[in-house]
Image (spheres, grey):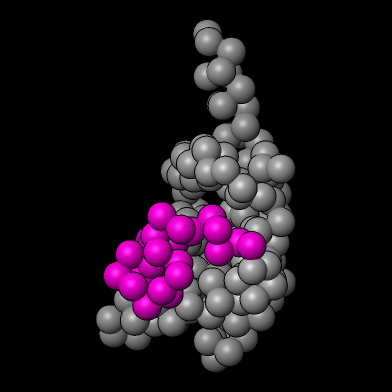
Amino acid sequence: MNSFIVAALLLCGATVALASEHCSYEDAEIVMKEWHQITSRGNSAPILMRAANVLFSGIFEKDPAARNLFTRVHVEDMHSGEFHAHTLRVMTGLSELINKLHSPAVLGSMLKHLAQQHALRDGVKHEHFHEFRDILYGSLGQLLDEYNPDAWKNCMFGILYGIAGNLP
C-alpha cells in the first residue's frame, strides 16, 4: 500500500481517536443540542453570518496580519459578497462537523479533507485555530440560553486539532 495512503489513514484514525477520547457521547449530545438552538431559529444563515462576523472580527483584532490570509475573498470589505460567502462556508462547515460528532468515520474523513485544504494555504498556522477557539467559546455563552463549556471544549478539541494539528 502506498505510504502516503497509510499515513493519511493513520492520521485520520488518530484524529477520530482524539475526538472520541475527549468528546464523550454525552458531550456530543450536549454540543449538538446547543448548536441546534443556534441554527434552528428560522433562517440560520443570518445567525451564522453574525456569528462569523464576531469570530473573524475577533481574530483580526487579535492578529491583524491574519487578514492577509483572506485577500482572495476580499477581506478588505468584510461586507462584500465574497467575504460573506467565505464566512458562511466556514460556519456551515463547522455546523456539519458538529452534526457528525456521532459519526466518527464521516467526521474523520471531513477533518482529513479540511486539514489538507488548510495545509495548502500559505501562512495558516495552528495558533489561528486557537484564536478561533477562544473567540468561539467566549461567544457561545451569549448565543445560547444553556451553555456547557466543558462539553464544547471536549468536542471542539478533536475538531480543531483534526484540522490544525499538523500546521506550523
Q: Where is residue 104 in the image (x, y as percent from the top left)?
A: 52, 45
Question: Residue drawn 30% across and 70% down?
Answer: 81
| The C terminus: image quadrant | top right
Name the side, left or right, on which 26 lies relative to 43. Answer: right
User: Residue at the top extreme?
Assistant: 1
Nearest to the observer: residue 85 or residue 23: 85
Nearest to the observer: residue 25 or residue 13: 13
* Residue 151 in view in this figure: no
Q: Where is residue 133 in the image (x, y as percent from the top left)?
A: 65, 66
Q: How many labels does the image show?
A: 0
Nearest to the observer: residue 77 or residue 108: 77
Question: Residue drawn 40% across and 64% down?
Answer: 74
Q: In this view, does 142 lie above or below 94?
A: below
Q: Does the magenta stretch include residue 80?
A: yes
* Residue 67 in view in this figure: yes
Nearest to the observer: residue 97 or residue 61: 61
Residue 46: quadrant of the picture: bottom left
Question: Residue drawn 43% across and 74% down?
Answer: 78
User: Residue at the front extreme?
Assistant: 76
Q: Where is residue 5 in the image (x, y as percent from the top left)?
A: 53, 19
Q: Give the range drawn in magenta.
A: 65-91
Q: Does the magenta stretch include residue 38?
A: no
Name the side, left or right, on which 9 lies relative to 18. Answer: left
Q: Is residue 4 above or below residue 32?
A: above
Residue 29: quadrant of the picture: bottom right
Q: In this view, does 108 lie above or below 152?
A: above
Question: Residue drawn 64% across and 58% down?
Answer: 129
